[in-house]
Protein backbone atom coordinates (compact mmCIF):
# COMPACT_ATOMS: atom_id res chain seq x y z
CA UNK A 1 0.00 0.00 0.00
CA UNK A 2 1.40 3.40 -0.90
CA UNK A 3 0.50 6.76 0.57
CA UNK A 4 1.04 9.87 -1.53
CA UNK A 5 -0.32 13.09 0.00
CA UNK A 6 -0.33 16.46 -1.75
CA UNK A 7 -0.95 19.93 -0.36
CA UNK A 8 -2.70 22.59 -2.44
CA UNK A 9 -3.96 26.09 -1.86
CA UNK A 10 -3.52 29.74 -2.72
CA UNK A 11 -0.16 31.39 -2.15
CA UNK A 12 0.08 32.38 1.52
CA UNK A 13 -2.36 29.70 2.70
CA UNK A 14 0.20 28.13 5.08
CA UNK A 15 0.88 24.96 3.04
CA UNK A 16 4.57 24.93 3.82
CA UNK A 17 4.00 25.23 7.59
CA UNK A 18 1.36 22.50 7.57
CA UNK A 19 3.27 20.06 5.38
CA UNK A 20 6.29 20.42 7.69
CA UNK A 21 4.15 19.78 10.78
CA UNK A 22 2.70 16.67 9.14
CA UNK A 23 6.18 15.42 8.14
CA UNK A 24 7.39 15.91 11.73
CA UNK A 25 4.37 14.07 13.18
CA UNK A 26 4.85 11.14 10.79
CA UNK A 27 8.57 10.95 11.54
CA UNK A 28 7.91 11.01 15.31
CA UNK A 29 5.62 8.03 14.78
CA UNK A 30 8.49 6.14 13.13
CA UNK A 31 7.00 6.41 9.66
CA UNK A 32 9.52 6.80 6.82
CA UNK A 33 8.47 10.08 5.23
CA UNK A 34 9.69 12.14 2.28
CA UNK A 35 8.84 15.82 1.95
CA UNK A 36 9.21 17.45 -1.45
CA UNK A 37 7.75 20.30 -3.47
CA UNK A 38 6.75 21.47 -6.93
CA UNK A 39 8.20 22.89 -8.98
CA UNK A 40 11.50 21.62 -7.65
CA UNK A 41 12.65 18.70 -5.54
CA UNK A 42 15.32 17.69 -8.07
CA UNK A 43 18.31 19.46 -9.61
CA UNK A 44 16.52 19.69 -12.96
CA UNK A 45 13.25 20.71 -11.31
CA UNK A 46 14.96 23.50 -9.40
CA UNK A 47 16.55 24.79 -12.61
CA UNK A 48 13.08 24.80 -14.25
CA UNK A 49 11.67 26.55 -11.15
CA UNK A 50 14.15 29.39 -11.64
CA UNK A 51 12.97 29.87 -15.24
CA UNK A 52 9.28 29.64 -14.28
CA UNK A 53 9.40 32.02 -11.35
CA UNK A 54 11.77 34.67 -12.73
CA UNK A 55 9.76 37.90 -12.51
CA UNK A 56 11.59 39.17 -15.64
CA UNK A 57 9.97 36.43 -17.77
CA UNK A 58 6.76 38.41 -18.34
CA UNK A 59 6.44 37.13 -21.94
CA UNK A 60 6.10 33.43 -20.96
CA UNK A 61 3.18 31.90 -22.84
CA UNK A 62 0.61 29.91 -20.85
CA UNK A 63 1.41 26.79 -22.92
CA UNK A 64 5.15 27.10 -22.32
CA UNK A 65 4.34 27.59 -18.64
CA UNK A 66 2.20 24.42 -18.52
CA UNK A 67 4.92 22.41 -20.25
CA UNK A 68 7.64 23.63 -17.91
CA UNK A 69 5.64 22.84 -14.75
CA UNK A 70 4.99 19.40 -16.18
CA UNK A 71 8.62 18.83 -17.20
CA UNK A 72 9.64 19.54 -13.59
CA UNK A 73 6.83 17.20 -12.45
CA UNK A 74 7.94 14.33 -14.70
CA UNK A 75 11.48 14.57 -13.34
CA UNK A 76 10.24 14.62 -9.74
CA UNK A 77 7.93 11.64 -10.26
CA UNK A 78 10.62 9.53 -11.96
CA UNK A 79 13.60 10.51 -9.83
CA UNK A 80 12.05 10.93 -6.38
CA UNK A 81 8.37 10.12 -5.84
CA UNK A 82 7.97 6.69 -7.48
CA UNK A 83 11.21 5.25 -6.00
CA UNK A 84 10.16 6.43 -2.52
CA UNK A 85 6.64 5.01 -2.78
CA UNK A 86 8.11 1.73 -4.03
CA UNK A 87 9.91 1.19 -0.70
CA UNK A 88 6.90 2.15 1.43
CA UNK A 89 7.88 5.73 2.22
CA UNK A 90 4.97 8.13 2.72
CA UNK A 91 5.46 10.97 0.23
CA UNK A 92 4.26 14.51 0.98
CA UNK A 93 4.38 16.99 -1.89
CA UNK A 94 3.84 20.76 -1.61
CA UNK A 95 1.72 21.25 -4.79
CA UNK A 96 1.23 18.70 -7.57
CA UNK A 97 -0.88 18.25 -10.71
CA UNK A 98 -3.95 19.99 -9.26
CA UNK A 99 -1.93 23.23 -9.27
CA UNK A 100 -1.66 22.95 -13.07
CA UNK A 101 -5.42 22.45 -13.40
CA UNK A 102 -6.13 25.34 -11.00
CA UNK A 103 -3.61 27.91 -12.33
CA UNK A 104 -2.88 27.01 -15.97
CA UNK A 105 -6.44 25.67 -16.47
CA UNK A 106 -8.96 27.69 -14.45
CA UNK A 107 -6.58 30.66 -13.99
CA UNK A 108 -6.18 31.29 -17.72
CA UNK A 109 -9.53 29.76 -18.67
CA UNK A 110 -7.86 27.09 -20.82
CA UNK A 111 -8.98 23.63 -21.88
CA UNK A 112 -8.81 21.25 -18.92
CA UNK A 113 -8.99 18.08 -21.05
CA UNK A 114 -5.75 19.02 -22.86
CA UNK A 115 -4.03 19.76 -19.57
CA UNK A 116 -5.20 16.44 -18.12
CA UNK A 117 -3.51 14.63 -21.04
CA UNK A 118 -0.30 16.54 -20.41
CA UNK A 119 -0.46 15.77 -16.67
CA UNK A 120 -1.11 12.11 -17.38
CA UNK A 121 1.99 12.01 -19.61
CA UNK A 122 4.11 13.79 -16.97
CA UNK A 123 3.01 11.63 -14.05
CA UNK A 124 2.54 8.32 -15.87
CA UNK A 125 -0.90 8.25 -14.24
CA UNK A 126 0.29 8.71 -10.64
CA UNK A 127 -2.42 10.41 -8.59
CA UNK A 128 -2.39 11.38 -4.90
CA UNK A 129 -4.26 9.23 -2.36
CA UNK A 130 -5.13 12.37 -0.41
CA UNK A 131 -5.02 16.06 -1.29
CA UNK A 132 -5.20 18.66 1.48
CA UNK A 133 -6.60 21.99 0.31
CA UNK A 134 -5.85 24.93 2.58
CA UNK A 135 -8.70 27.25 1.82
CA UNK A 136 -8.17 30.99 2.07
CA UNK A 137 -9.34 33.99 0.10
CA UNK A 138 -6.51 34.57 -2.42
CA UNK A 139 -6.32 38.30 -1.60
CA UNK A 140 -5.82 37.44 2.08
CA UNK A 141 -3.20 34.81 1.15
CA UNK A 142 -1.23 37.26 -0.96
CA UNK A 143 -1.46 39.85 1.85
CA UNK A 144 -0.09 37.31 4.32
CA UNK A 145 2.76 36.45 1.97
CA UNK A 146 3.61 40.13 1.38
CA UNK A 147 3.90 40.55 5.16
CA UNK A 148 6.36 37.63 5.44
CA UNK A 149 9.90 39.00 5.07
CA UNK A 150 11.32 35.49 4.35
CA UNK A 151 8.83 34.63 1.57
CA UNK A 152 10.02 34.38 -2.03
CA UNK A 153 7.77 36.51 -4.30
CA UNK A 154 7.51 34.88 -7.75
CA UNK A 155 6.24 35.66 -11.28
CA UNK A 156 2.93 33.85 -10.61
CA UNK A 157 2.20 36.06 -7.62
CA UNK A 158 2.64 39.13 -9.84
CA UNK A 159 -0.47 38.06 -11.80
CA UNK A 160 -3.75 39.92 -11.34
CA UNK A 161 -6.02 39.07 -8.44
CA UNK A 162 -8.66 37.88 -10.95
CA UNK A 163 -6.24 35.11 -12.03
CA UNK A 164 -5.76 33.98 -8.43
CA UNK A 165 -9.51 34.15 -7.79
CA UNK A 166 -10.20 31.96 -10.85
CA UNK A 167 -7.60 29.43 -9.67
CA UNK A 168 -9.15 29.38 -6.19
CA UNK A 169 -12.65 28.81 -7.60
CA UNK A 170 -11.17 26.05 -9.77
CA UNK A 171 -9.67 24.32 -6.75
CA UNK A 172 -13.07 24.24 -5.07
CA UNK A 173 -14.62 22.71 -8.20
CA UNK A 174 -11.90 20.04 -8.38
CA UNK A 175 -12.40 19.23 -4.69
CA UNK A 176 -16.17 18.95 -5.13
CA UNK A 177 -15.77 16.62 -8.13
CA UNK A 178 -13.54 14.19 -6.22
CA UNK A 179 -14.59 14.70 -2.60
CA UNK A 180 -13.16 11.35 -1.41
CA UNK A 181 -9.62 12.42 -2.38
CA UNK A 182 -9.76 15.99 -1.00
CA UNK A 183 -9.70 17.36 2.52
CA UNK A 184 -10.72 21.03 2.46
CA UNK A 185 -9.59 22.92 5.58
CA UNK A 186 -10.32 26.54 6.52
CA UNK A 187 -6.79 28.01 6.48
CA UNK A 188 -7.75 31.03 8.61
CA UNK A 189 -7.95 28.78 11.71
CA UNK A 190 -5.03 28.55 14.17
CA UNK A 191 -2.05 26.50 12.96
CA UNK A 192 -2.60 23.79 15.64
CA UNK A 193 -6.30 23.40 14.76
CA UNK A 194 -5.48 22.94 11.07
CA UNK A 195 -2.75 20.43 11.88
CA UNK A 196 -5.13 18.43 14.11
CA UNK A 197 -7.72 18.23 11.31
CA UNK A 198 -5.07 17.00 8.86
CA UNK A 199 -3.68 14.46 11.35
CA UNK A 200 -7.17 13.03 12.03
CA UNK A 201 -7.56 12.37 8.30
CA UNK A 202 -4.07 10.99 7.71
CA UNK A 203 -3.82 8.68 10.72
CA UNK A 204 -6.34 6.02 9.59
CA UNK A 205 -4.68 5.88 6.16
CA UNK A 206 -1.20 5.06 7.45
CA UNK A 207 0.28 1.66 6.74
CA UNK A 208 0.24 -0.39 9.97
CA UNK A 209 3.83 -0.63 11.14
CA UNK A 210 5.23 -3.40 13.35
CA UNK A 211 5.49 -0.99 16.28
CA UNK A 212 1.83 0.05 16.06
CA UNK A 213 0.22 -3.25 15.00
CA UNK A 214 -1.65 -5.10 17.76
CA UNK A 215 0.41 -8.07 18.92
CA UNK A 216 -1.25 -11.43 18.36
CA UNK A 217 -2.41 -13.22 21.50
CA UNK A 218 -1.37 -16.87 22.11
CA UNK A 219 -4.40 -19.17 22.00
P1 LIG B 1 5.22 28.14 -4.22
O1 LIG B 1 6.38 27.22 -4.39
O2 LIG B 1 5.52 29.35 -3.40
O3 LIG B 1 3.96 27.42 -3.80
O4 LIG B 1 4.93 28.79 -5.64
C1 LIG B 1 4.59 28.02 -6.71
C2 LIG B 1 3.81 28.90 -7.68
O5 LIG B 1 3.69 28.19 -8.90
C3 LIG B 1 2.41 29.21 -7.19
O6 LIG B 1 2.10 30.56 -7.49
C4 LIG B 1 1.53 28.30 -8.02
C5 LIG B 1 2.33 28.07 -9.27
N1 LIG B 1 2.14 26.78 -9.92
C6 LIG B 1 1.43 26.73 -11.10
O7 LIG B 1 0.96 27.75 -11.58
N2 LIG B 1 1.27 25.50 -11.72
C7 LIG B 1 1.79 24.34 -11.23
O8 LIG B 1 1.63 23.27 -11.83
C8 LIG B 1 2.53 24.42 -9.98
C9 LIG B 1 3.14 23.18 -9.40
C10 LIG B 1 2.69 25.65 -9.37
Image (cartoon, rainbow, N blue to C red):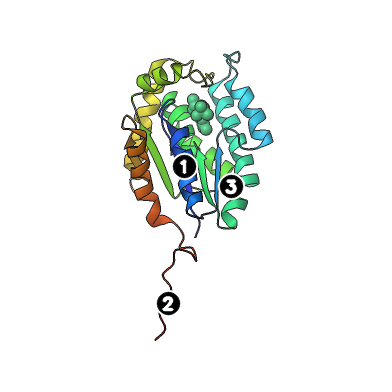
- Front residue of 37/67: it is 37
**Nearer the observer, disc 3 or disc 2?**
2
Q: Residue at x 58, y 22 (%)?
A: 53
Q: What element does badge 3 sit on?
A: helix
The residue labelled by disc 3 is: 81
The residue labelled by disc 2 is: 216
Residue 109 visible, this orientation: no
Label 1 and label 3: CA atoms lie apart by 12 Å
Q: Quick check: 148 above or below 83? A: above
Q: Residue at x 35, y 20 (%)?
A: 140
Query: In this image, 217 relative to 62: left or right?
Result: left
Quadrant containing the C terminus is bottom left
Earlier residue among tags 3 and 2: 3
The residue labelled by disc 1 is: 6
Q: Residue at x 62, y 52 (%)?
A: 83
Q: Quick check: 89 above or below 9? A: below
Residue at disc 3, CB closer than 8 Å to ligand 1: no
Residue 138 visible, this orientation: yes
Q: Quadrant of residue 17?
A: top left
- Measured as percent of width and height from the top left, residue 15 is found at 44, 33
Q: Residue at x 40, y 50 (%)?
A: 202
Amino acid sequence: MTLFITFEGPDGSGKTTQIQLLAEALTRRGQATLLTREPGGTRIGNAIRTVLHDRAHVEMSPRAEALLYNAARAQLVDEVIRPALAVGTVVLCDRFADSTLAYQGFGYGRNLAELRLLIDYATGGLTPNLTVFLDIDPAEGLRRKQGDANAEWNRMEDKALAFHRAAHAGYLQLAAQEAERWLVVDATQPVATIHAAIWRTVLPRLPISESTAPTSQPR
